[in-house]
Structures are given as structure tokens and as C-alpha cells.
Amino acid sequence: MTSLHGLKVIDLSRVLGGPFCTQLLADHGATVIKVEPPQGDETRGWGPPFKQDASSYFIGVNRNKLGMALDLTQPQAKDVLLDMLADADVLVENFKPGTMERWGLGFEQTLSKRFPRLIHCRVSGFGATGPLGSMPGYDAVVQAMSGLMSVNGEKGAQPLRMGVPVIDIVTGMNAVIAILLAVHARESSGRGQFVEATLYDSGVSLMHPHLPNFHLSGKSAARSGNAHPNICPYDMFSTATVPIFLAIGNDRQFATFADIIGDAALANDPRFLTNALRLEHSQALRAAIEQRIEDVEGVVLAETLMQAGVPCGAVVDTAAVAAHPHTRHRDMVVEIGDYVGTGSPVKLSETAARYRTPPPMFAEHARQILEGMGYDENRIALLLATGAVPTAMRGA
């Protein structure tokens, strides 16, 4: 048994935030039907590398889903979607706000009246209202607009985009939270509701501790490279081999660290007795640390420090992460036949995630889904012939 067994989700979303959300729901047992536009989810083409009709980008966030396509500009396709929603619990979409309403499928306009238990989750860039309402949003754009780029990068250098689409991923997680909160609320109210997660809100929420620092000091944060604005030492240091990242959060950890690197007196230096003092004298402390560890093997030092309770990790690449035994131990590598993906970060002791099927080929399950709704062969043939239910991707 899985946590979300019996929950039916219709997924109209594309790209990353929405698909990441629905894959997480699917991993934990929800039945997710991914409905693509006639051109397909655009990330199918975001490669190389590719496997058959999909890029690794698409493959990474679409397992455990049934796949079909609908041309929602056609009335017959809208009818199919409404039939699908008749017994669905959740609809997830990330169209530009106003699109569903233009199609006559808005939540207040139509869906809440026809399907009072339906939870409609919208993932968007900025929401539908406000100064930026209905504007398009992409992860990197919102990294810039939410302040994240302003605090990322080397001291004195230009702002820098983070190397992963962190806002898209966090927005997907926030969408999962919103959906599950609404499912819980429905237990007592009997009604669904409209919920949303936006890239902008998610990006702003990630600005910790920079926004709290600003609210207290009135000063915008400057870029500090790998260093932390509030904690020291909290930075990357070179060794004889790989760099290490040291993240010391209290005086006890600092004393242990000083002892392990063979300089116990460092912890009793008047300049380094407290975190505030270490921040004040961060350059002197950095020089002292670098001198002590410049000839040390980085991976061994990091492991020794971690075993002693001092947070420290070797800075490794993607291949090393994939090969690390702890990655496997935590079930963070998923294999289904020749499919290899990244596991769910959410672990439950009694209702663990289950990995059942690889990502669908374009419209792979269209006939199966239509037959499951009781459509007869004549109706299915008409939908396929008119392209209301496409079976092959159209050109963009």
C-alpha cells in the first residue's frame, strides 16, 4: 500500500514545476494521467541526450504516469477532459493564468460547479493578479527577480544563476504541499478548492537568511561566494586533492575541528572564540585553516570531520554522486528495466514510494484511457481521426 493509493490526478502541466509535483504524487501511489498538448511537452526536445522520443530532462520528472494528448482547442477534446475529471481528485496545470478560463474550464467558472470535490492546482510564474499577474515565468528569470542571483556568485563578481532549477523544483514541492493540505481539508468540508504555487513566491521564500537580515538591518546582502553571511567558518577550502566544504555551526564543533586539524590552540584564540568574532576575523581564520589543510587528502579529512560531528563534505561532481554508496542506500537511484532515474526524496516507513513504470511515450496510453472511461470504438476512432486526441506529436 502507498500513501496516495486511490488518488486520481489529471496532469495538464509541462516543463518542470508541475511535472515534478505530479511525479512525486505518482511515486507515492496516485494514479496520474499526463495530458500533453498536440506538440508534446516541450521538454521532450530539451536535449541531448535523448532516448526514443524524449530527452533526459523529460524522462527525469515523468515516471509512474499514464500518457495521452488532447487538443483542447477542439470541443471534443474538452468533453474528454471533463469526462476524465468526473472521478478525479486533483487537476494540475501550469498554463498562463486565464487560459483555462478562455477555454471555459476555469475553476470558479465551471470546474467547481461541476466537480465540487475537485482540487485545482495551478503552477504559474507570478499568479493571476498583482503588478506581475499573468506574466510568463521561467526559473532563471525568477532567480533574477526574487533576489537569488543577487546573493549568488563570487564576492565582487557579477550575479550568477544557480546551476540547478531550484525555483522550479521548490515550486513543485510547494504544489504537492498545497494539494495535500487541500485533500486534508476536503475530509471535513467535503469540497475541493483552488490552490496555487508560483515561482515568484517560491523564490522569495528561499531568500533566507537574506530577507530576515534585511528586515532587521535594512541592508541588502552582498555576494560572498561560498561564505555564509551569518556563520563562520562556513566556506569551501582547498586541500591537497579535492576541495572541502566546511559548515561549522557552533563553538563546540569549532573546537573539535581545530583539534582534528592539529591546531587545538585555534579554538582558544581570542579572535575566534565565538561565531561573531570568527565572522569579524574571517580572513585571518581562513588563512590559518588553509595553512593547516593544504597538504591533507580532502575526502579523508571530510570523512574524519563528519565522523566527529563536524559538518564537512568533499566537493564532488555528478558522476561521484551517482556512484556514492549512500546514494544507493537511500534509494535515490531508481531502475525500471533500462530506465534509470532519481528516487523520491520523501521516505515513509509504512507506505514507501513505489516505482512502477518509466515515463510514457507520447500518447502511449490514449486508447487504454479512453476505453477505461467506457468510450466505444466508434467514438475513439472519431477522436483519433479528428486529432482531438492526437497519437503523434505535431510540429511546434
Image (cartoon, helix red, strand yellow):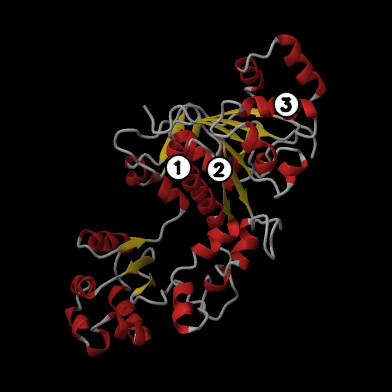
Q: Earlier in the sequence, mark 2 or mark 1?
A: 1
Q: Position of residue 309 (x, y in %)?
A: 22, 62
Residue under the image location 32 percent in, 64 percent down: 298
Q: Earlier in the sequence, mark 1 or mark 3?
A: 3
The quadrant the N terminus occupies is top left
Residue beneath disc 3: 79
In terms of image quadrants, where is residue 315?
bottom left
Question: In the rendered view, would you say 213 is above or below 188?
Answer: below
> Within 10 angstroms of label 1, few (less than 14), some, or many (20 or more) residues?
some
Marks 2/3: CA distance? 22 Å
Residue beneath disc 2: 193
Q: How many marks?
A: 3
Dot 2: element = loop
Is label 2 in contact with label 1 (beta carbons under 8 Å)? yes
Q: Looking at numbered disc 2 in the image, what kind of residue is underneath it?
A: Gln
- Residue toward you, 19 or 290: 19
Residue beneath disc 1: 185
> Within 10 angstroms of label 3, few (less than 14), some, or many (20 or more) residues?
few
* Image position of 382 (left or right of 158): right
- Residue toward you, 335 or 298: 335
- Residue toward you, 74 or 275: 74
Marks 1/3: CA distance? 29 Å
Q: Looking at numbered disc 1 in the image, what kind of residue is underneath it?
A: Ala
Residue under the image location 34 percent in, 42 percent down: 330
Residue under the image location 28 percent in, 77 percent down: 292
